[in-house]
Amino acid sequence: MLTSLKAMGEQKAYRLEGEALQKANINLIVPYMANSNPLLRCAAAEAMGRLAQAVGDAQFVASMAQFSFDKLKSCRDAINRTGFALALGSLHRYVGSLGSGQHLNTSVSILLALAQDGTSALVQTWSILALGLIADTGGGMFRGYVEPSLSLCLRLLLTTPTANVDVLQCVGKLVSV
């Protein structure tokens, strides 16, 4: 499924049209966003971004971003939060130009807040990774978020225990973007 969405998204001549087909794809992807296997969560987040790319409609992208925002606000467990945080990064990676500046602001604000939550190193890691995806593809639109992101990185480098290697590696990747 991921490969077909990738191919369709990269082919500018074809679009995934039809609400029923879009809904069917969403219903296939969303359950894996909360899967206990991190590889499946990662694939689902990637598929979410590729689906938005294949649809190529700003309203669809906005609804997927809002769906992720709502899930991040309502779900308190680390598994759901990691999947939907990475989904935000994937949405911006593949269709960031279709989303509005408001969605960029909301996404970055949510990811910065999740990355500061010291109760779960797993959520911190995936949030920083998603923030890096947005920074990497955001171009000039990300300029206003460089200072808060670097401030977060410095704070995490000073306060994160050295045993949380994944968090520190993601901070390094974010700084190098």
Image: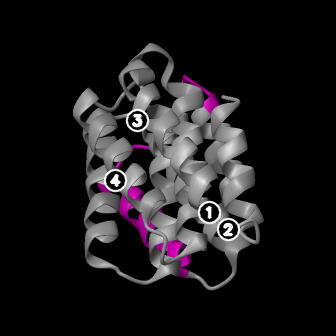
Position above or below: 172 against 122: above
Q: Secondary structure at mark 4?
A: helix
Pointer 2 and pointer 1: residues touching (CB < 8 Å)?
Answer: yes
The reply to whether the C-beta atoms of the residues labelled 2 and 4 are less than 8 Å apart is no
User: Which residue, given by chain and number where applicable, does mark 3 sit on?
Assistant: 148
| The image quarter in which residue 56 lies | top left
What amino acid type should be assigned to the residue bearing mark 1?
A: Thr
Q: Is residue 16 above or below residue 31?
A: above
Q: Which residue is mark 1?
A: 160
- Tag 3: residue type? Pro
Q: Give the spatial CA distance, label 1 vs label 3.
A: 17 Å
In front: label 2 or label 3: 2
Q: Which residues are magenta?
A: 10-34
Residue 111, image x and y in percent?
Answer: 42, 52
Q: Residue 70 placed where, x, y %? A: 25, 65
Q: Which mark is residue 161?
A: 2
Q: Earlier in the sequence, mark 2 or mark 4?
A: 4
- Residue shown at 49% from the left, 70% from the top: 118
